Amino acid sequence: MERLYIEGGIRLQGDVTVHGAKNSALPLLVATLLTGDTSRLTNCPPLSDVAATGSILRHLGCQVTQSADTVTVDSTTITRSDIPDRLMREMRSSILFLGAIVARCGEATLTYPGGCELGPRPIDLHLAALKRLGVQVEEDHGAIHCYVNGRLQGADITLAFPSVGATENVLLTACLAEGVTILRNAAREPEIRDLCTYLNGCGARIYEQAEGVLCIDGVSRLHGCVHEVLPDRIEAATFLAAAAVTGGAVTLHRCQPSHLAAVFPVLEEAGCSLAIGQDTVRLLAPPRLTGFGTVRTMPYPGFPTDSAAPLLAASCTARGTTVYVESIFENRYRYVDELARMGARIRVDGRVAVVDGVKSLQGASVTCTDLRGGAALVVAALGAAGRSDITALHHLDRGYAYLEQSLTGLGARILRENRD
Ligand code: UD1
């Protein structure tokens, strides 16, 4: 079993580079399927979710090669349109293959996706939107069979909620449909814009008509292109939380500061000072943070739900109280019990968590419950007195590449051990 040992209480200092965004890389990899050509994604982090997406592409008949942070996909050779349950369960974003395979092959058979246990994660918005584009959906004992009679047809679609995944599925399906699709109440996350940039680079015609309104003028074919994955704003926020909890002085490089705009006021409220450059952020933290006030997660450009867990961990030792309100997912606080083992004082009631800052946390044996919950444990362990060991690292490996190297570079004492 793999364990991460962290010797806490060391002030993080120095420079760290932000890697490519998981939540961009996954839909981009799926999108390569549409082109029937070769695409190269650079700045694509070697995460287990990226590998799982590569496995699905290979299963479908694509040639996938990865060297360091570059993934090349040749989708000329696609031979099938189904995904077995075993591969679908690896991650939530496998549902994006639905739109891409239907658009490429005219039919698709897959099952319900897996992913982090954050409460129910239905796909009703995805299916309703695809139906509007002419996709016929039949469900049978957990299998979803989709097909199109003739060609996909552009449509006027309004999402009941600006779901990131549903927006991506519509983009993937509509860019090869006949006619124009208008997507209203679309998600506005930077990763959506990154997907549009890639697809337009492949010959799609997508533009933003207004905030949250996407217009997709269907084309009959796409071609491959080279695309650089945008920087990971969640990894960036995790590094900032780690710097803050240790009273550190850290500069992030190769990040996109505007994507972190909702996170900065929270850190400033905590007493940190920030210097924002074009693609850098420097954070200087006080020896002890003060309570962050109320942090309410919202769809972009609001405070990102994925950044709440690492920030919550940082607030455990702040002077005063911080209140978190989770507006996106129903069950996002499973990691809180693990933080309690380290001495954190947190009360959870439904979607609200109240953190009463304690003077210090103590290192402990803790287990990751999900990806961002795992990041919270790392942040807490970095700030705690003494040694922590963290297990169930497969959750962390879904979303953080080079985690130990990045933190070691900032002076952290962190070691991964494999007892096997
Ligand atoms: C994406 C991100 C995830 C992030 C989330 C919200 C990826 C790979 N994952 O997930 O890291 O936390 O956005 O920013 O990009 N919903 C429905 N029906 C649907 C679809 C969604 O009810 O058909 C609900 C979900 O259960 C959830 C909310 O809408 O409560 C948000 O989900 P969504 O925006 O779709 O998130 P994901 O695309 O799954």
Image (cartoon, rainbow, N blue to C red):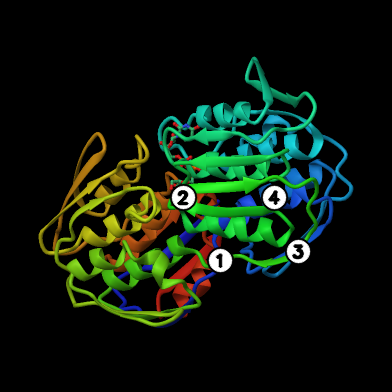
User: Which residue: 56% across, 32% down?
Assistant: 126
Q: Nearer the viewer, mark 2 or mark 1?
A: 1
Res 385 seen here: no
Res 211 seen here: yes
Q: Residue beneath label 1, please?
A: 230
Q: Nearer the viewer, mark 3 or mark 2?
A: 3
Q: Earlier in the sequence, mark 3 or mark 2?
A: 3
Q: Residue beneath label 4, please?
A: 31
Within 10 Å of disc 3 (Cα), the crowding (few <14, some 14-19, many 20+) is: some
Q: Earlier in the sequence, mark 2 or mark 1?
A: 1
Q: Residue beneath label 2, please?
A: 371
Q: CA distance from mark 3 to mark 2?
A: 31 Å
Residue 29 locus on image (x, y percent): 68, 53
Q: Residue beneath label 3, please?
A: 225
Residue 233 locus on image (x, y percent): 45, 63
Q: Secondary structure at mark 1?
A: loop
Amino acid of disc 1: Leu
Q: Earlier in the sequence, mark 1 or mark 3?
A: 3
Does mark 1 have its CB less than 8 Å from ligand 1? no
Q: Residue furthest left?
A: 320
Q: Quadrant of residue 224?
A: bottom right
**Whether label 1 touches label 3, CB < 8 Å:** no
Does mark 2 have its CB less than 8 Å from ligand 1? yes
Q: Quadrant of residue 88?
A: top right
Asked whether, in this view, residue 106 is left or right of residue 14, the answer is right
**Whether label 4 touches label 3, CB < 8 Å:** no
Q: Secondary structure at mark 4?
A: helix
